[in-house]
Amino acid sequence: MELTVLGSGTSVPHPRRSSSGFWLQTNGGTILLDCSASSIHRMAQEDLDWPGLDAIWISHFHLDHCGGLAPFLFGTKYAPGTQDRMKPLKIFGAKGLRDLITKFSDANRYDLLVQPFPIEIVETEPLESFEILTGVEAVTYSTPHTEDSRAIHLRENDATLVYTADTGFDETLATFARRVDLLVMECSFVLDKPVEKHLELAEAIHLIRRAEPRCAVLTHFYPEWDSVDFDKEVKQFGTGLEVLQAFDGMRIDIGEK
Ligand SMILES: [Zn+2]
Ligand SMILES: [Zn+2]
């Protein structure tokens, strides 16, 4: 598998960090992990095959994670690149996903589910195991962020990935991500976080220590990170593990491809 970071930022407009979106290339197809409004154009910017996208995973219904869904579906209705597409686009998320898309569609009769190709909306339960793509097993985990926020664990052959999306501190999340090849974890704040439902660096590092991933990538940075030397801050914790700072355009190989 290979991961491309489309957006390492938040809902706050930022010149170098788009809102959340990650492109995952697998042998079984492609998955967009979260679909912010900016990530739909970032796919084109990274020269990725967005007209052939196979699946979308929505971690929760905050707009910096799902705000691109309606514009994307509005685009695929009319884009030249999708008119001959036959294969379905599967959109996965928590209960409420179908309602969200339908309500947006009905707001101005956009008919977002009327496409040249089939759309399949799949609502999943926490800890439910399902095949997100052929040969790619997914399990989700309920995180302390919103009622419907979920982390996702993906496995293709021996390669594993956990994407926490937005989350507050939760020791069990480290168990969920135990020894994965790549752990993509939010780290909204540096220090003294102003809200419980996100992580600050010390908490993220604590969870990484417990999880012991082969590699950890921190993401979802509020602008306060702009003035911080990431490597220097991380080094102070002396984890001995690989902890990287996500940036828009970053590409990472995960296990065998
Ligand atoms: Zn967010
Ligand atoms: Zn959120």
Image (spheres, grey):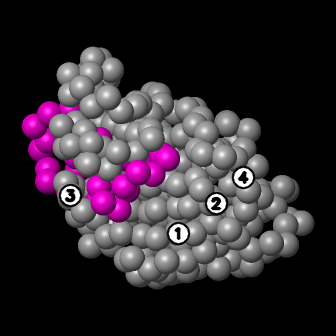
Residue furthest toward the right? 84
The residue indicated by pointer 1 is 138
Disc 2 to disc 3, how far (Cα)?
A: 27 Å
Q: Which residues are magenta?
A: 173-200
Q: Secondary structure at mark 1?
A: strand
| Badge 3 amino acid | Glu
Label 2: few (<14), some or many (≥20) within 10 Å?
some
| Badge 2 amino acid | Asn
Q: Position of residue 150 (x, y in %)?
A: 37, 66
Check contact, mark 1 vs mark 2: CB within 8 A: no
Label 4: few (<14), some or many (≥20) within 10 Å?
many
Q: Closer to the N terminus: mark 4 or mark 3? A: 4
Say the numbered circle drawn on residue 171.
3
Q: Secondary structure at mark 4?
A: helix
The residue mark sitting in front, 2 or 4, is 2
- Residue at image location 67% in from the left, 36% down from the top: 45
Label 3: few (<14), some or many (≥20) within 10 Å?
few
Q: Closer to the N terminus: mark 2 or mark 4? A: 4
Disc 1 to disc 2, how far (Cα)?
A: 12 Å
Q: Is 82 or 237 nearer to us in this picture?
A: 237
Q: Position of residue 161 (x, y in %)?
A: 50, 53
The residue indicated by pointer 4 is 50
Name the magenta segment's main secondary structure.
loop
Check contact, mark 2 vs mark 3: CB within 8 A: no
Disc 2 to disc 4, how far (Cα)?
A: 24 Å
Q: Position of residue 125 (x, y in %)?
A: 41, 81
